[in-house]
Amino acid sequence: MWMYSWHELIALTAAALALDLLIGDPKWPTHPVIYIGRWVRFVERKLRPRTAGGVGGKADAGTPPQAGANSLEQGAAVGTAGPESTAAGGSGREEAAASRLTDGVTSARAAESSSRVKWQGVVLTGTTVLLSFGAMYGLTLLADWVHPWLGYAVSIWFIASTIAVKGLKQAAYRVYEPLRQGDLEAARKYTGYIVGRDTAALDEKELTRAVVETVAENIVDAVIAPLLYAALGGAPLAMAYRAANTLDSMVGYRNDAYRDFGWASARWDDVLNWVPARLTGALMVGVALLTPGLSAQRAARAIRRFARLHPSPNSGIPESAAAGALGIELGGLNVYGGVPSERARMGWPMRERTQRDIDLAVRMLYGVSLLAMGGLLCVIALFGR
C-alpha cells in the first residue's frame, strides 16, 4: 500500500494479529463482511433476478461446496444429471435426424448460456473485489490524512476484522465443551453452525472429525492468507482477499444454480490461497515439531501423500497436515441434505478420534498464529529501521 512503507505494513499486520488474539472478532453490526455479503446478493439479484439467493451458503439444498469454497468446510463436489434425452419414437430417419438437429441446437444454446452466466460471475467477482479494495483504500487514506495515528488505528482495526483466530477457537470449543459433558445434541447443534454437512446423526468421532477439518482448513482462510495479504498491501489488500473468500463461500458451489455463476469466484479463491496454503502446511509441521504429542514427521509425510487427493488444490494441505500430526484419519463419508458424498481419507489412523483432538487442533491453530507473529516480529527486528 503506497501510503505506508513495507516495515510499517509488517508492524500493522503484527498489531492486528495481536488485537485479534486479544479480543477476537466483536459482534458489531458494521462488520465489513456483512456489507460485502449484502453487495454480493445485490449484484446477484441484478444479474440473475430469477435465481438470485435461491440457494447457496448454508441454505443450499444439500449440495456441498465446490472445491475451494470457504463455508468453514470443504465438501466433495456432487454432480448433477444433465438434461434428460428424448428417444426417437420409431417414425424413421427423418424424425431421428430432426431430433439430432434439435439436440445440437439445444446444446449450442446451453453452451452459450453457460458462457454468459460465467461472465456474469466474472463481473460479480471483479466488482466485489475491486470495490472492497477501493473502499478500504479510500477510508485508510482519509484516516491518514486526518492524522497518521488515526490511519494506523483504522488499518489495524480492519486488518484484524479479516483475521479470526479467537473466533475459530470459540467456535471449536462450543462443540468441545458439550462433548466433554456428554451432550451430543448440543455438540451437533454447534457443529452445524460451522459446517455444511448434516450433523443430526453424527457421533463423537464424526463430530470431532468435522471440527478438526474445519479448524485445519480455516488456518489458511482465517489466519495465514489475510496476514500475508495485509503484510503485502495493508488493510485494502487484506479486505480484497476477504471479499474474494466471502464470494467463494456464497456462490462457489457446484450445483445447477452456481456451477457457472460461481466459477470465477471459486477459481480466484483457489489462486489467492495457493501460496498461503503451502505456507500454512510448513508452519503446521513446525508447530508439530515444537508440540509434545504431535508428530512433525507424520505431518510432512501426510502432506506429500494425501494433500493431492482432496478436491481442493489448497485445503488438502492443512487437513492432511493435521491428520498426520495428530495420528488420526480425516475425510470419509459426509452427508449434505441427505445426499452422501465420499471424501478422500487422509492420514494414518494410529488411534481412534476423540474429543481431545479438537483441543489439539486449536493448539495447532494458536501455534501457527504465534509462529506467524514471531516471523513478523523477526522481520521488523532484522530489517526495520
Image (cartoon, grey):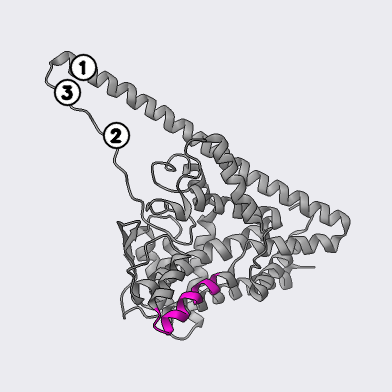
Residue 78 belongs to magenta span:
no
Dot 2 amino acid type: Pro
Residue 356 lies, with reference to residue 342, above or below; the image says: below
Residue where numbered disc 1 is placed:
97
Per the rendering, the mark at residue 83 is: 2
Residue 95 in percent (x, y) is at: 18, 16
Residue 114 lies, with reference to residue 209, above or below; the image says: above
Name the foreground residue: 268 vs 73. 73
Dot 3 amino acid type: Ala
In the figure, residue 112 lies in which quadrant?
A: top left
Report crowding for label 3: few under 14, some 14 to 19, many 20 or more residues within 10 A (C-alpha): some
Dot 1 amino acid type: Ala
Residue at 45% of width from left, 53% of height from top?
A: 59
How far apart are the two marked residues, 2 and 3, measured between alpha carbons? 16 Å
**Residue 295 visible in image:** no
Residue 335 in percent (x, y) is at: 33, 60
Residue where numbered disc 3 is placed:
88
How far apart are the two marked residues, 1 and 2, measured between alpha carbons? 19 Å
Residue 305 in percent (x, y) is at: 35, 65
Residue 72 lies, with reference to residue 121, above or below; the image says: below
How far apart are the two marked residues, 3 and 1, measured between alpha carbons? 9 Å
Q: Secondary structure at mark 3?
A: loop
Please report the bounds of the magenta region as a residue range: 168-183
Does residue 364 appear left or right of residue 147 in this picture? left
Residue 339 in percent (x, y) is at: 30, 55
Residue 179 belongs to magenta span:
yes
Label pair 2/3, CB-CB below 8 angstroms: no
Q: Nearer the viewer, mark 1 or mark 2?
A: 2
Choose the circle earlier in sequence order: 3 or 1.
3
Name the foreground residue: 342 vs 170. 170
